[in-house]
Image: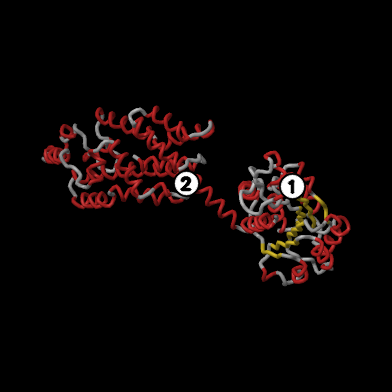
């Protein structure tokens, strides 16, 4: 039962309920104390141990009901009760056989047509023999003589054996259905059915028919079971897999229907960076002694050093200026870089954003006072038209913003540096390089394209502290993470 509880804890974690190893051990002790007889009492007891707030408690109850699934056994018991009053469902005629060959108890009376030829007595004898013919394969015995509850238990044990809880994507449903069927003994059943069909006798043919019907019903039941296991175990795993793929795909290849998913990924990545880099400065317990603070704080103790003070360096937030090319396919990269930076408002409170295709315009307030979609739509409308002109952008920046750049400023430029053979104005970028703490150029194209055609990276690169290929969320996360890490 401990293994079952561990699997249940995995399901809870999939549902974003945080369960520590210590809490798992507490849950095991709880199960040993309360037992398994009273389902409701057990569920409420485990909820006290594992759920820490009302939201988690609701999720816990849902996971408990789906994981332990009492309806599977209640349906099985209902089926068993019906079997006690009705004949075997698999003995009914479905048109596969001649009606004269059906397993009908009245066929002895109706055999008068063949009785004149002496066939009725032989057929009745064959039918009587059929009633004593039993399957020999293990799965056949389970299907024909075992209860539905026994079948359900065998199916769950086979699911544990093939590790159905490792299912990741929905397309694996057929694979795990086949694995469970094989683990339950499908091969032996298939061989028995083939042998019965090859025998040629009526009782053997009827038994083969019943076994095939039972096998098909079992396959449907197993398929439903695998589907439930997918929603229990793989929903979050599949989401994580999709998020990993979205992190790696080129942003220019994303379609509009993917934007919402990518936004969620960006916010999660930003939240992780905030957790890493927004820690408040702690009082140091070791390092270099701060003599002045120590003396001042210990004057009340007549000079006895009861309160030791250590020197600590102050973390200074960076001032970031982000310049984004929003023309053509580059706009997708700019969209998510801006989204990334404004998601980090807690640790990057001094972000100023600019957009251009030719003329440069500041969009900082637009993003601060509008939703992301509205801000991006207006940015594209106001600055995304026209022929790309990096020289014009640099001139506008010099005329309006160069005085705001100092040795604490980090300038990030995102664009492909394709200037349509215009004047690149690289000397202005060199001036920005001299005044700023860092100039980072993010180019979505591969380095092999940086010097091809109208690309001006060969002139811009020497005027930058750092140049990076940046065309996916993973690249953006790395660049922004390094930016935060290096700021002290």
Question: Of residues 114 and 212, which is closer to you in this image?
Answer: 212
**Residue 234, numbered label:** 2
Instruction: Tell me if residue 328 comes above or below residue 196 in the rendering.
Output: below
Q: Residues within 10 Å of mark 1 (few under 14, many from 20)?
A: some
Q: Secondary structure at mark 1?
A: loop
Closer to the chain start, of discs 1 and 2, is 2
Q: Quadrant of the N terminus?
A: top left
**Residue sticking out furthest to the right:** 399
Q: Is residue 262 visible?
A: no
Tag shown at residue 160 = none
- 425 and 48: which is toward the camera: 48
Q: Nearer the viewer, residue 477 or 438?
A: 438
Which residue is under mark 1?
A: 349
Per the image, label 2 sits on a secondary structure element best described as helix
Name which quarter of the figure residue 78 lies in.
Answer: top left
Vertically, is 310 above or below 130? below
């Amino acid at each position: 039962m401990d293994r079952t509880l561990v699997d249940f804890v995995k399901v809870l974690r999939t549902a974003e309920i945080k369960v520590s190893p210590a809490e798992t051990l507490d849950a095991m002790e709880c199960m040993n104390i309360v037992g398994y007889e009273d389902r409701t009492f057990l569920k409420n007891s485990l909820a006290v141990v594992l759920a820490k707030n009302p939201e988690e408690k609701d999720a816990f109850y849902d996971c408990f009901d789906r994981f332990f699934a009492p309806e599977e056994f209640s349906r099985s018991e209902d089926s068993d009760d019906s079997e006690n009053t009705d004949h075997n469902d698999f003995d009914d005629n479905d048109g596969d056989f001649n009606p004269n060959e059906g397993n009908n108890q009245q066929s002895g009376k109706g055999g008068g047509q063949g009785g004149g030829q002496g066939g009725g007595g032989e057929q009745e004898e064959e039918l009587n023999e059929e009633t004593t013919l039993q399957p020999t394969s293990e799965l056949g015995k389970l299907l024909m003589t075992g209860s539905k509850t026994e079948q359900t238990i065998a199916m769950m044990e086979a699911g544990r054996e093939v590790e159905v809880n490792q299912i990741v994507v929905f397309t694996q449903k057929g694979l795990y259905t086949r694995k469970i069927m094989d683990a339950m003994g499908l091969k032996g059943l298939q061989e028995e059915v083939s042998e019965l069909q090859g025998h040629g006798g009526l009782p053997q043919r009827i038994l083969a028919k019943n076994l095939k019907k039972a096998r098909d019903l079992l396959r449907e039941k197993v398929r439903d079971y695998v589907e439930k296991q997918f929603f229990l175990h793989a929903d979050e795993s599949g989401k994580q897999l999709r998020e990993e793929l979205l992190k790696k795909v080129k942003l220019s290849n994303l379609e509009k229907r993917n934007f919402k998913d990518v936004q969620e990924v960006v916010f999660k990545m930003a939240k992780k960076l905030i957790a890493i880099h927004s820690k408040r400065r702690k009082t140091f317990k070791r390092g270099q002694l701060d003599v002045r603070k120590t003396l001042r704080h210990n004057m009340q103790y007549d000079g006895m050093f009861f309160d030791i003070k250590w020197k600590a360096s102050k973390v200074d937030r960076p001032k970031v200026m982000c310049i984004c090319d929003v023309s053509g396919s580059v706009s997708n990269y700019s969209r998510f870089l801006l989204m990334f930076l404004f998601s980090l408002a807690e640790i990057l409170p001094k972000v100023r954003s600019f957009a251009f295709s030719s003329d440069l315009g500041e969009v900082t307030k637009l993003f601060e006072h509008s939703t992301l979609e509205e801000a991006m739509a207006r940015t594209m409308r106001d600055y995304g038209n026209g022929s790309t002109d990096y020289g014009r952008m640099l001139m506008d920046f010099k005329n309006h913003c160069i005085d705001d750049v100092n040795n604490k400023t980090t300038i990030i430029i995102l664009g492909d540096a394709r200037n349509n053979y215009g004047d690149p104005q690289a000397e202005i970028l060199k001036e920005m390089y001299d005044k700023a703490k860092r100039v980072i150029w993010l180019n979505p194209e591969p380095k092999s394209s940086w010097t091809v055609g109208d690309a001006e990276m060969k002139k811009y690169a020497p005027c930058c502290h750092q140049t990076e290929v940046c065309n996916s969320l993973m690249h953006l996360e790395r660049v922004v993470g390094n930016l935060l890490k290096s700021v002290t």
